[in-house]
Image (cartoon, rainbow, N blue to C red):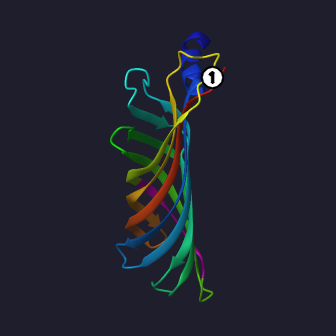
Amino acid sequence: MFARIFPILFMGYASCALGLGAGVGVTVDTRGTWTVLLSLQANNLGVRVEPQKTPRTEQAAYLNPMEISGGLRLNGEHGRAAVLRMDLPGVAFSQDELDGGWGYNAALFMRNEITWPLDGSKSSVAMGAVVKGAYMNHLSLEQLKRLESRPEWPDGWAIHSIGPGASAALMHDDDGWYGQFTLSMLYEYLNYFYIGL
């Protein structure tokens, strides 16, 4: 059994990708409330997809992405409220066209959201599922230095990018089901690399 699992583990640790980013976004839900949020995100445990066969197109799947956001709800039944949103580990995918200067990513998360009304009324908790996507324009592209001991390994890349993102979520709290829609402007630092084992 270990012999079957080892190639998968090796691929995960030898051929890797890591994305770190931040953003600002506006959320509107089907109840008519508006929220402004700042976010931090990490796409980690990334596995590059056949970098030797597609040397000018990089792709990766991420096994443990997450995002944390905080901000202010501007209206609603109890007026303004502080909001903490946690998009917990899900799955994500990225693709970057190195010659074209652009990329995109998509992700599926489970969302937990805690809201504290500023008027002192009871806080609320909501849970749900969210689908995200973003188009990223490359600001810079840097080829990472190869290890002298591994000249056969494909190039690694460091990419700084910025672009618009959008998400849709189906949420549930004590008052029932509702939808959320978010538009964001995002910055991301993305690394496609090999670890020297």
User: Is 172 situated above or below 64?
Assistant: below
| Image location (x, y in percent) of residue 28 | 38, 73
Left or right: 185 in relation to 46: left
Label count reads 1
Foreground residue among 154 and 148: 148
User: Is 195 situated above or below 188?
Assistant: above
| Image location (x, y in percent) of residue 32 | 36, 79
| Image location (x, y in percent) of residue 114 | 57, 69
Foreground residue among 117 and 156: 156
Alpha-carbon neighbours of circle 1 within 10 Å: few (<14), some, or many (≥20)?
few
Quarter of the image where one finds residue 15:
top right
SS at mark 1 in the image: loop
Identify the residue position indicated by label 1 in the image. Answer: 147
Residue at 46% across / 59% down in the picture?
A: 186
| Quadrant of the image containing the C terminus | top right
Left or right: 83 in relation to 77: right
Residue at 42% across / 33% down in the picture?
A: 58
Foreground residue among 135 and 89: 135
Is-magenta flag for residue 125?
A: yes
Give the overall secondary structure of the magenta segment: strand
| Quadrant of the image containing the N terminus | top right
Question: Mark 1 belongs to which amino acid?
Answer: Leu
Left or right: 165 in relation to 87: left
Residue at 38% across / 60% down in the picture?
A: 164
| Image location (x, y in percent) of residue 38 | 54, 68
Is-magenta flag for residue 188?
A: no
- Provide the residue span drawn in magenta: 122-130
Quarter of the image where one finds residue 2:
top right
